[in-house]
Amino acid sequence: MSGFVFSEKPIEIARGEDVWLYDTNGNEYLDFGASYACTPVGHCHPDVVDAATSQLEDLMYVQASYPHAARTALYEQLADTAPVDVDNVWLCNSGTEANEAALKFARHATGREKIIATKQGFHGRTMGALATTWKGKYKQGFEPLAGGVEFVDYGDIDAMREAVDDETAAVIIEPLQGEGGINPVSTEYLQAVRVATATSGAAMILDEIQTGLGRTGSMWAADGHDVVPDVLTTAKGLGSGLPIGATLCRDWIAENCGNHGSTFSGGPVVSAAAGATLDVLEREELPAHAAEMGTYLREEIDERLGDEIREVRGDGLMIGIEVKRGSNRLLRELAIEHGILALPAGRTVLRLLPPLTIDRDHADAVVDAIEEVIA
Ligand SMILES: *Cc1c(COP(=O)(O)O)cnc(C)c1O
C-alpha cells in the first residue's frame, strides 16, 4: 500500500544538481517547478549538503528541550530576515503544520474563534489548515473539519472589510495564490487587509509557504507589498527539500500563544540545512535575481505566445500561464519531449516555479519548448 495516496509520474529520478534532475535512464530534465518550490537555491546546493551532512555526523537529533547551535542560529537568521518585529520563531516540519500553529496561536492570543480565509486559497491538509483551504476535492469525506471558518472573495476589499469584525481571531491569506491558479492581488488590497485586521484586533496571517524565500522578487512577498503581518508562515524551500516549516509571529501573538509543541521542532539536521539555504539566498542575492528573471520570462512569454494563451501573470519566479485548453497534455509533452518539468495550478494554468538560480538560457529553452507544445 505504500505511496497509495499519490499518482506517481512515469519518470524515476536518480539525481539532482542545481536546476537539473537526472532520471534512471540517463535523461536530463530542467526542473521548472523546483519540485513544488522546494529547491529555491537549486537541487543539492553544495553548501546545504555540507551543512546537513556535517550536522548529521555531529548530532542527528536531541530532544527539543535542549538548545543546540544549529537551531539557535536559525532562530536568529529567520528573525533577521523577517518583516520588522515578526521575529518570534516556531519551527515545525511542514507548511500545513506552520499554518496549523498560526491558527492556534491566533485563537489563543485573541480569545476569539472566527477565522476568515479566501476562495481559491490553499493552506494545507491537516484538519485545521484544511478547514481554511477552499477546494472541495481536498475536503471530501474528511468533514467535519475545524469550525468557525468563513470564506470571502480573494481581492475584494469591501468583502474583507465586511467580514472582519470584533469576533474575528484571524485572516489567513496568501499574498499571491499559488495552488488556486497563480492569482495576484494588489498592494492596496493587502494593505486594506492589514488595516481591517489591526482595527478589529484580529491577527493577519500571511501564508508565504509558496511566495516566500525570494520567489516573488523580495525575500518575502510582504516586503514587496510593504505589509507587516502579525504572523508569517514559511516551509517548502526553507530546508532545500528537507522537511522544515516556520511560524513567525509578533510579540503580542508569541506572548499569549498557548500550549503547543512538536517532538521534531527544529531538529539539528533540518535546521542546519535551512540556515545554509538562507545564507545562499542572501549571499547570491537570489531574490533580486528572481525579480529580474521573472520579468524577463513574463515579457518573453507575453511577446512570443501572447496570441496562443489567455494570460501570463505572477510575480518574480512564481508564474502562471493561463492556456486556452487543459494544461495536462502540455505538461506531459514538455516533460517527455522537451525534458522540462513544470506544474499545473488548476486545470488550465501552467505554473512555473523554477529554482531562483536559473539564467537566461534556461528561460529561453523553456519559452521555446512551451511555444512548440502550444503550437
Ligand atoms: C504547499 C502549501 C501549503 C502546505 O504545505 P505542506 O508542506 O504541503 O503541508 C500551505 N500553503 C501554501 C500557500 C502552499 O503552497
Image (cartoon, rainbow, N blue to C red):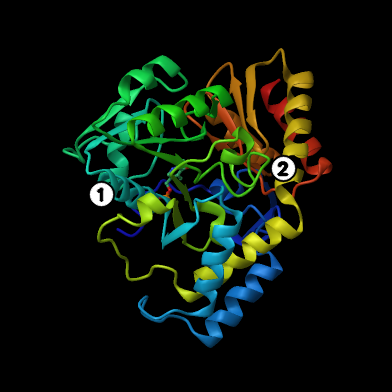
Judging depth in this view, the residue of 185 and 110 nearest the camera is: 110
Quadrant (top left, top right, bottom left, bottom right) of the C terminus: top right
372 is higher (above) or lower (below) than 95: above
Which of the 4 quarters of the picture holds residue 146? top left
Quadrant (top left, top right, bottom left, bottom right) of the N terminus: bottom left
Instruction: Provide the secondary structure element on which disc 1 rests.
Output: helix
Question: Label 2: few (<14), some or many (≥20) within 10 Å?
Answer: many
Q: Please tell me which residue is depicted at 67% across the width and 49% down the height of the picture.
A: 355
Q: Residue furthest right?
A: 361
The residue carrying mark 2 is: 290
Judging depth in this view, the residue of 285 and 322 nearest the camera is: 285
Select label 2 or label 1 by which is in front: 1
Q: Amino acid at mark 1?
A: His
Instruction: Provide the secondary structure element on which disc 2 rests.
Output: helix
| Residue 113 in the figure: left or right of residue 162 | left
Q: Please tell me which residue is depicted at 51% across the width and 63% down the height of the picture.
A: 242
Question: Label 1: few (<14), some or many (≥20) within 10 Å?
Answer: some
Q: Please tell me which residue is depicted at 37% across the width and 56% down the height of the picture.
A: 254
Q: Amino acid at mark 2?
A: Ala
187 is higher (above) or lower (below) than 73: above
Q: Is residue 168 visible?
A: yes
The residue carrying mark 1 is: 108
Q: Is mark 2 within 8 Å of ligand 1?
A: no
Q: Is residue 240 visible?
A: no
Where on the image, by quarter, is ligand 1?
top left
| Residue 111 in the figure: left or right of residue 28 | left
Q: Residue furthest left?
A: 144
Judging depth in this view, the residue of 255 and 51 nearest the camera is: 255
